[in-house]
Amino acid sequence: LIVLGDLNDGPGLDEYEHLFGRSSLEIITGEGQETALTLFDPHAHGALTQRIGAIHTTARFYIRDKKRYMQALLDYILISPDLMARRPVWRIWHPFDDPGCWDNRDLREALLAASDHFPVTLDLEL
């Protein structure tokens, strides 16, 4: 099973978290629950288990009144345990965090111009 997309949510980012006691990301991954299926994304796992320090980000938004960018982890590729055996490799194509994206000027400029979100990919051995 693969679940992917922009969840527009993460720990501490959703006002509805107070209603359900956890974010939609925590519900989908099964984090902190007794469940038959747990889905995994290393970036989501880091965000859910790490309280202090740097985290990966997949989106950046310009906040006009503060004249700054805010970065967030919103985009995920979550996979079931059986796919973890296929040696998955995730990549966030963030030009400021991925040297391969930064070093390619055309790619860097295209990523910055295309969207306020950066692509997330997953390579699996099939």
Image: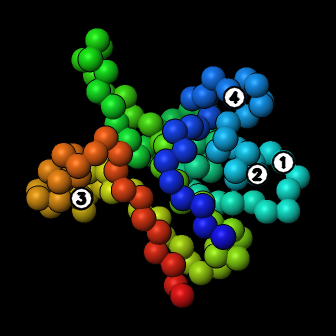
Label 2 and label 4: CA atoms lie apart by: 15 Å
- Rendered location of residue 77, percent (x, y): 54, 60
Q: Nearer the viewer, residue 117 or 99?
A: 117
Instruction: State which tag comes first along the sequence, 3 or 1.
Output: 1
Q: Disc 1 residue type?
A: Gln
Residue type, mark 3 in image: Cys
Q: Residues within 10 Å of mark 1 (few under 14, many from 20)?
A: few
Residue that appears at 54% across and 88% down: 126
Q: Residue at x 11, y 58 (%)?
A: 106
In the picture, measured across the screen, residue 87 lies left or right of residue 121, that is: right
Is residue 104 shown left or right of residue 65?
Answer: left
Image mark for residue 51? none
Q: Secondary structure at mark 1?
A: loop
Q: How many marks?
A: 4
Evaluate if marks 1 and 2 touch, with contact meaning CB atoms under 8 Å apart. Answer: yes
Q: Which residue is mark 2?
A: 30
Residue 92 figure quarter: bottom left
Mark 4 Cα within 10 Å, few/some/many (few <14, many 20+)?
A: some
Element class at badge 4: helix
Q: Quadrant of the N terminus?
A: bottom right
Label pair 4/3, CB-CB below 8 angstroms: no
Q: For residue 17, which numbered disc appears in the image?
A: 4
| Residue at the limit of the structure toward the right, as seen here | 34
Camera sees residue 49: no
In this rendering, position of residue 82 left or right of residue 121: right
Type of amino acid at the residue the image marks with label 4: Glu
